[in-house]
Image (cartoon, rainbow, N blue to C red):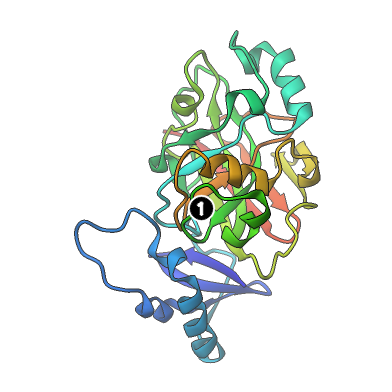
Amino acid sequence: MRLCRFNENRLGVVKDGLVFDVTQALDVLPPSRYPHPTYDSFIANLDKVRARINEILPKAASLPLEGLTLLSPVANPGKLIAAPVNYLKHLEEARADPGVHHNNQIDEIQRIGLFLKATSAMVGPSHGVAIRHPERRNDHEIELAVIIGKSGVGIASADAWDYVAGYCIGLDMTVRGPEERSLRKSVDTYAVLGPWMVTADELTDATNLGFRLTVNGELRQSANTKDLVIDIPELIRFASAFYTLHPGDVIYTGTPAGVGPVKPGDLIVAEFDQIGRMEVAVRAV
């Protein structure tokens, strides 16, 4: 199932260029009050929501996908976890290009581990990317984003797939410079997720997904998830060895070679096999 959030926090099922409005299914979510949960309630109750969707979908009103405002498919992630230099060719380009490494030491992911992006950086594709420091290089990084479906800590690699709710496309935008990654990658709008979530029962094999990114029609990045240095189960094991994963947490799995700068007025198009395509406009703040 392909589930999107659109317009004014509506819930939709995406099929054949149409979005079926199933917002009514959110009525099964448990009520909450302050202090609200620190995880995403929709993802935590996904099975209940999907059961209700199946009941109402046959009579749901549909809208053309084109022209809708697409929000992030996850509304309230507790953590945005990211894997640096998780493709070998990107590690090589990062070490070779001063515009990328900016005199920082670029170590292997096995040595430096993962990092966090601020959840305040998260937007959907229709919101676009707002360049905060135009005097610096601001780069695109396309990644497979893994959405965690249930809580777990100390998860074994062999059990990791059981904790995946679904997948979407991620753009891990970054400002180049000497500061720590988490700061430079947590600018408002620099964590794009979209265009929708494909549930794990539909996308059953995320280990061999081709993907690509263009800027103004120019191909910049093209790769396959089979080339990840640390694969998805091991990323989940790695992350859960340090902190509890909760429903709605998102893991950005890493970007391949071809990262490059964008500027206001550019159009980024990111595509993943078995997921879809999203357009992200770049603008000034």
- Residue under the point 52% across and 49% down: 250
Q: Quadrant of residue 30?
A: bottom left
Relative placement, left or right, of 225 versus 38 is right
Please give the name of the residue rendered at 51% of the width and 90% of the height, measured from the top-left corner: 55
Element carrying mark 1: loop
Percent position (x, y) of residue 13? Answer: 56, 74
- Classed neighbour count for the residue bearing mark 1: other residues with Cα under 10 Å, few (<14), some (14–19), many (≥20): many
Residue 35 to residue 141: above or below: below
Q: Amino acid at mark 1?
A: Ser
Q: Is residue 76 left or right of residue 61?
A: left
Q: Which residue is mark 1?
A: 126
Q: Residue at x 55, y 20 (%)?
A: 176
Between 108 and 74, the one lying in front of the other is 108
233 lies above or below 40: above
Residue at image location 54% in from the left, 41% down from the top: 239
* Farthest left residue in view: 34
The answer to whether 197 is drawn above or below residue 154 in the figure is: below
Percent coordinates x, y for residue 183 in the rendering = 44, 26
- Please identify the quadrant where the N terminus is shown: bottom right
Residue 165 visible in the shown view: no
Quadrant the C terminus occupies: top left
Is residue 43 visible in the rendered image? The answer is yes
Q: Measured from the top left, where is residue 75 in percent x and y?
A: 42, 57
Give percent across and percent down for residue 41. Answer: 38, 64
Q: Is residue 142 left or right of residue 78?
A: right
